[in-house]
Image: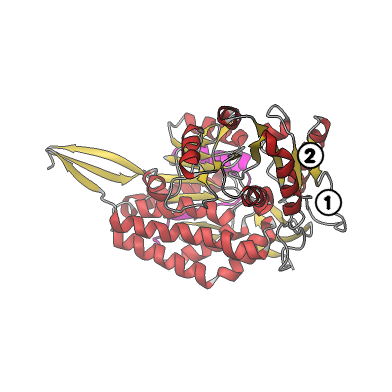
Amino acid sequence: MTAAYTKFFIDGRWIEPENRQTLDVINPATEESFATISLGTAQDVDAAAKSARAAFDSWSLSSVEERKTVISNIITGLKARGDEMASAISQEMGAPMSLAKTAQLGSGMGHFAAILGILDNFEFEETRGSTKIVKEAAGVCGFITPWNWPLNQIACKVAPAIAAGCTIVLKPSEIAPVSGYILAEIIAESGLPAGVFNLVNGDGPTVGAAISSHSEIDLVSFTGSTRAGREVAKAAADGIKRVTQELGGKSANIILEDVEDFTKAVAGGVLGCFGNSGQSCNAPTRMLVPKARMAEAIEIAKATASKAVVGDPNAETTRLGPVVSELQFNKITALIERGIEEGAELIVGGPGRPEGIETGYFIQPTIFANVTNDMNIAREEVFGPVLSILSYEDDGEAVAIANDTDYGLSGYVSGEVSHAQKIARQIRTGMVHINGAGPDFAAPFGGYKQSGNGREWGLEGFEEYLETKSMMGAA
């Protein structure tokens, strides 16, 4: 049975949009529709933006305690509807239920919890001589979010914006919109005043473009492809809006000669690349190993890939679900075929579905070895379970290869601690994971170069939603 999520949340009410055009939401594991949404228009965005503007004056003056109460209520709502949320995420973008219940749901809740800690300690005012420096809400925020970590990417924008006193117009991905709709239902019951949070579903060229260019929106935060990020920035430019972007990545994973456990480092790199079916912008998709250990790395990678079970997201043994759509399936397949044409050594996987799977957008976990950094598979963001293994002669070459990319989102280094830190400082990325360290909600998330600008997560992510005012003579 297909569920209908056809209303928009504007000015504290669920309303029917003027345009009754709908879009099917496809379960990538079955290739069948499981939900429908309405496709919004610029008029819907206009109504939402005006609602957010009208609510801004009062919400921007709300107390820290009011904001904390709302955020706490949202966390309570997410806990109560956690199973429903995880199921929606799994159905809309293909995550195995084990991943949806832990990392996908947990990361979203983690951002709301982390912002409570920031509000406990943040000083919105300070005195410098006779001047009072005041941090105030940045204004009305337009959020355009992706499908790969749907709740996470919404939460890491919505939580700090609410905490800063901003008001919001959100457009979740039309590919994975149900989790955003459920979150909107939770927010509707959280005690947040009408107009502070608004949701309009739709596609990027229509609703996304309208958000980016709307005169009542002061700040746009976008997560998605670098190509789409350019369009958002252009649309926002005429209004001199603040624009923060978290875009693509092609992260290098340097395994140093002095790593304590080479097998563990290589295996961890393979699983890190394959996590979420490779659909993470910060995935370690380029593994760099010492040239003399390439053969050893290949054998470890093969053995690890053989344990990466692909299949039904509801099965307990499944490690990899499908990729999100037919479009992504075809793009990933084409890049795998291009890697073969370019002469990379295919050691695991290849184009086409795994053996025995006839339906769903399932990709074989694929590993190429003896890749050179000029090959397409080493330069383009594949966004699927495809790993490239490259070799290097010395530290200088490893760093040069890592930095030889248009992107600069994340990096990974495994080795003796002081050596790994020395290499990490030379990598031109916004983040580096050392010796398998995982994500940290308190640490800023974002990149250099064409991976975007600004930061999300933690204190730095919170401060993106604040303006600074100097009140001379006020102290």
Q: Is residue 331 magenta?
A: no
Residue numbers of the magenta segment: 191-215
Find the distance from the CA under tag 2 to the CA under tag 1: 12 Å
Which residue: 59% across, 42% down? 224
Give above or below for 327 relative to 98: above
Badge 1 is on which residue?
353
Q: Which residue type does callout 2 highlight?
A: Ile
Question: Mark 2: which secondary structure?
Answer: helix
- What residue is shown with label 2? 336
Identify the residue at image location x=83%, y=31%.
341
Give the mark, 2 or 1, whose residue is nearer the N terminus. 2
Viewport quadrant of the C terminus:
top left
Query: Does residue 5 appear in the picture of this structure?
Result: no
Residue 439 at least partly seen: yes
Judge left or right: residue 69 versus residue 425. Answer: left
* Colour basis: secondary structure
Q: Is residue 31 left or right of residue 391?
A: right
Q: Dividing the picture into quarters, in which one does residue 112 lie?
A: bottom left
Whole-percent x, y for residue 128 in the image = 16, 39
Determine contact: label 2, label 1, CB under 8 Å: no
**Which quadrant: the N terminus?**
bottom right
Farthest-out residue, bottom: 80
Q: Where is residue 218 shown, x and y percent of the image? A: 41, 40
Measured as percent of width and height from the top left, residue 195 is found at 43, 55
Instruction: Residue 214: say if magenta.
Output: yes
Measured from the top left, where is residue 151 in percent x and y? 55, 57
Task: Give the side of residue 179 with respect to residue 167, left or right.
Answer: right
In the image shown, does 350 or 49 lie closer to the viewer? 350
